[in-house]
Structure formats: structure tokens, C-alpha cells
Amino acid sequence: MESIKRVPIKEEFKKNPELKEEDLQHLKEWYQKQPHFPKYIDENDLILFLHSNYYRLEPTKTTIENYLTTRTHTPEFFSNRDPLGSKELRKIMSTVAILPLEKRTPEGYGVMYSRLINLEPDRFVFNEGLRLYAMICELWLYQEGTIPGHVFVIDVQGVQMTHALRITPLALKKWLYYIQEAIPLRLKAMHFLNTTPVMDFILGLMKPFLKKELMEVLYLHQNTESLSKHVPIDMLPNETGGKAGLIKNLYAKVLKDVEDHREYFIEEESVMRVDESKRPGKPKSASDVFGVEGSFKKLDID
């Protein structure tokens, strides 16, 4: 598969004394015995999954299964990922900025900062924003390799009720499932910055799908003063009171990286998906993974 420059395996072993060769071998053998999985998975991916589960084998297997299955059954986030060929992606790239920040927190955590850069509500398409978020997050995880933890800072500056009303509960449910059950990262905190009363509405949509663990590390900040107790403000873009540089310049680099990996995204979509016809037992559908979709839209009557 088209490659992303990964951290050398040797380095991952050096960084992570808990990472054991026999665990990695066990995971490889287990993976190869799953008839519905894609044929090949990168060794670096297996290390990320192990690391995100604190090297516990059974939870790691569950996360791998959830990761591949979720990405197969949510085409709204994980298909049409050509950064040059998709009109929808091009449009959302000039509507939201998603920035993996260069510096780390004192604990060594990586921080992903995001915000609107075009405030026109009709330009904001929730699913497209998450599609792009997933792509940038993927490159970030793969290029950085294992790190002690990850922090999301979502700057809601400029978000109005007209934006919030474009968020659908079903899309939110699927996305939060992916973040909590599938993505191989150690999510240490989720911070919402520059909150206004609109945030109460958004939080109301999120709450039914938040596990207790994420609820406990979700923070709302009206300004950077309270955020500074968790994240050094210098790390953030200049517009937020930080010293990392202008959003425009930082984001241009991120988007170039996404475009440079065009081949990877196109190929990943065609090979890294579950083949439900080969799944042992009963094939899964989106409603098996996320619950009945019909209850959000209409009553399903057989």
C-alpha cells in the first residue's frame, strides 16, 4: 500500500519498554486468522493499537475489529477521500482549520486544534468536517507514532446556532463511537474553547453518546485563561494568543501534507475495509454497530 513515512519499529521498541516482541507476534498471527479483515496491516499500526490499549491484548483486538468495521460502515466519514478530486473536501478545507500542533504539553501529549475559518453557516457540512478531521488525524497518528497521550482542542469561536443545527445526532453518535471505541490513540482530554450558550445545545446532543471516561475529561472554557491550566497557551496559533504561528500558514502545511498523501487515501479506502461476506458468523451492518438508524429519522416498518 502507498506508504506514509512511519517511525522506525526499532525506535518504537526503544520508546516503549512495555512493547513486547511476543505480543506483537501474537497480534500478527491473530490478525491473519480473521478471514474478514483486509489482507495486510502495517506493523506500525499494530503497535499503535497495542499502545492505545496500554498493551492489553484482548482490548487491542477489540479496538482493531471496531476500527476496521466502523470505517467500513461509515462511508460518510471514510469514503470520497481524494483531497484533490473531491469538491466537498476542497470546500470544507477552506471552511474549517484542523491543526496538529508542533509542540507538546509538559506531559508529552500531542494537541490537535480546530476551528472555523469561514463563518458562513451554509459552508459548514458536519460530515465533511469529520471526514477531513479523520484524514488529518490519521496522518498525525501515523507520522508521530506512539506518544503518551492526545488532546483535542476545539475552538468554537464564531460558531452560531445555525452551525449547531447542522449537526445530526446520528452522525455525532457514529463519530463519538469511532473516537471512543476504535481510533488507536490515548485521548487524555477534549477542550472546547471560547464557549458561548450555543455550546449547551451541542453538549446536549453529545451527552447521550459520551462514555463516563470521556465525560470526565471534557472541559468547557470561555477563554484561554482556564485552558492554560491544561495546555500551554504558547503552543496555540497566534490568533488564539499563542506563539505557534498564523493559522493560515500552519494550515497550508497541513493541507499540503494531506495532498501529498493523495495516493495513500485513495488506496486505503479500497483495501483497508472489512469483507462482511467472509465474517465468521453473521455479517454486520451499520445498525448492528451503531444501533438502529431508523429511530433518528423515521420509524422503520418491515
Image (spheres, rainbow, N blue to C red):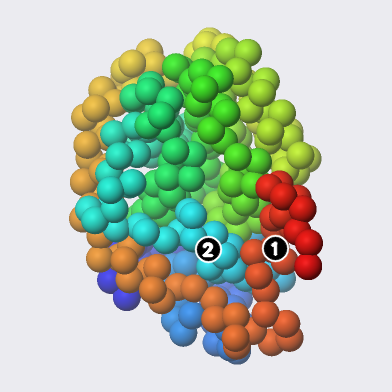
Q: Position of residue 202 (x, y in %)?
A: 63, 27
- CB-based contact (under 8 Å), mark 1 and mark 2: no
Q: Which residue corresponds to mark 1? A: 287
Q: Position of residue 237 (x, y in %)?
A: 34, 23
Q: In the depicted view, which residue is nearer to us: 226 or 39?
A: 39
Q: Is residue 99 left or right of residue 161?
A: left
Q: Quadrant of the C terminus?
A: bottom right
Asked if 144 appears above or below 119 in the picture, the reply is below
Q: CA distance from mark 1 to mark 2?
A: 14 Å
At x 58%, y 13%, the residue is 196
Q: Which callout, 1 or 2, points at the residue further toward the start of the chain?
A: 2
Q: Is residue 240 left or right of residue 156?
A: left
Quadrant housing residue 203:
top right
Quadrant housing residue 211:
top right
Total number of numbered labels? 2
Q: Is residue 283 left or right of residue 261?
A: right
Q: Residues within 10 Å of mark 2 (few under 14, many from 20)?
A: many
Q: Position of residue 133 (x, y in %)?
A: 43, 44
Mark 1 secondary-structure assignment: helix
Q: In the depicted view, which residue is nearer to us: 245 or 121?
A: 121
Q: Which residue corresponds to mark 2? A: 71
Asked if 134 appears above or below 105 in the picture, the reply is below
Asked if 297 appears above or below 46 in the picture, the reply is above
At x 53%, y 37%, the residue is 151
At x 66%, y 23%, the residue is 201
At x 47%, y 67%, the residue is 45
Q: In the rendered structure, which amino acid carries the disc numbered 1?
A: Ser
Is residue 132 shown to the viewer in this render?
yes
**Residue 18, numbered circle:** none
Q: In the rendered structure, which amino acid carries the disc numbered 2?
A: Arg
